[in-house]
Image (spheres, rainbow, N blue to C red):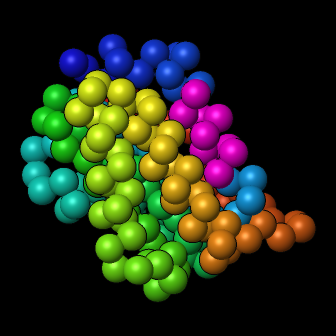
Amino acid sequence: MKASEYFTDERLAEIDAAIKQAEKTTSGEIRLYVEDKCKEDVLDHAAFLFGELNMHKTELRNGVLFYLAMQDHKFAILGDAGINAKVDKDFWDHIKEEMVSYFKNGEFAKGLETGISMAGKALAEHFPYLKGDTNELPDDIIVK
């Protein structure tokens, strides 16, 4: 299935709401990038996109990228240096396992909402929202 076929306006709105809810309690930044195919190592490609999206330019280095390649059945979660220094080394793997349980049933939006919520809780714990915090990165969901 193509990303644009699965991620309808309704599903995108649900995921967008999950991102906004997660970011209400943290200075961290969460982004989602979805495309059909990933012709290279998924982590390498996600790292490239992380840089292209300037996610490494947040003041506290607390950005998180969720990346999916729908037709290739690949996905990755990348956290920046600030959040990676605060969470256990298997933290992202635990989130991936939770997400896979939904993905196996074709519930990609629900899996993403779950992963985003889990990441948001960790970001809020380590990087709580403070009065005057600004949204350092766009919140748009990218579907190619």
Number of marks: 0
Magenta span: chief secondary structure: helix
* Extreme-right residue of the structure: 131
Question: Is 18 covered by the magenta stretch?
Answer: yes
Residue 2 at x, y = what percent? 25, 20
Residue at x-position 10% and y-position 52%: 40
Side of 92 where 113 appears, left or right: right
Image-quadrant location for residue 58: bottom right
Residue farthest to the bottom? 85
State the residue in front, 71 or 52: 71
Decide: is 125 above or below 106.
Answer: below
Residue 80 visible, this orientation: yes
Judge left or right: residue 61 versus residue 49.
right
The residue at the point 75 percent across, 53 percent down is 24
For the N terminus, give its image quadrant.
top left
- Asked where in the image residue 93 lies, by quadrant, the reply is bottom left
Q: In the figure, 114 relative to 124: above or below?
A: above
The residue nearer to you, when weighing 73 against 139, is 73
Task: Indicate left or right for 54 with 94 as reference.
Answer: right
Quarter of the figure with the C terminus: top left
Magenta-colored stretch includes residue 140: no
Query: In x, y percent, where is residue 4?
Result: 35, 19
Across and down, in percent, residue 23 comes to: 68, 54
Q: Nearer the viewer, residue 4 or 110?
A: 110
Q: Locate residue 68 relative to residue 86 in the image: left or right.
A: left
Q: Residue 37's quadrant in the figure? A: top left
Q: Is residue 81 visible?
A: no
User: Residue at image x 65%, y 35%?
Assistant: 17
* Region of the chain picked out in magenta, as a range: 14-22
- Please tell me which residue is depicted at 46% across the width and 16% down the height of the picture: 8
Q: Is residue 39 above or below residue 43?
A: above
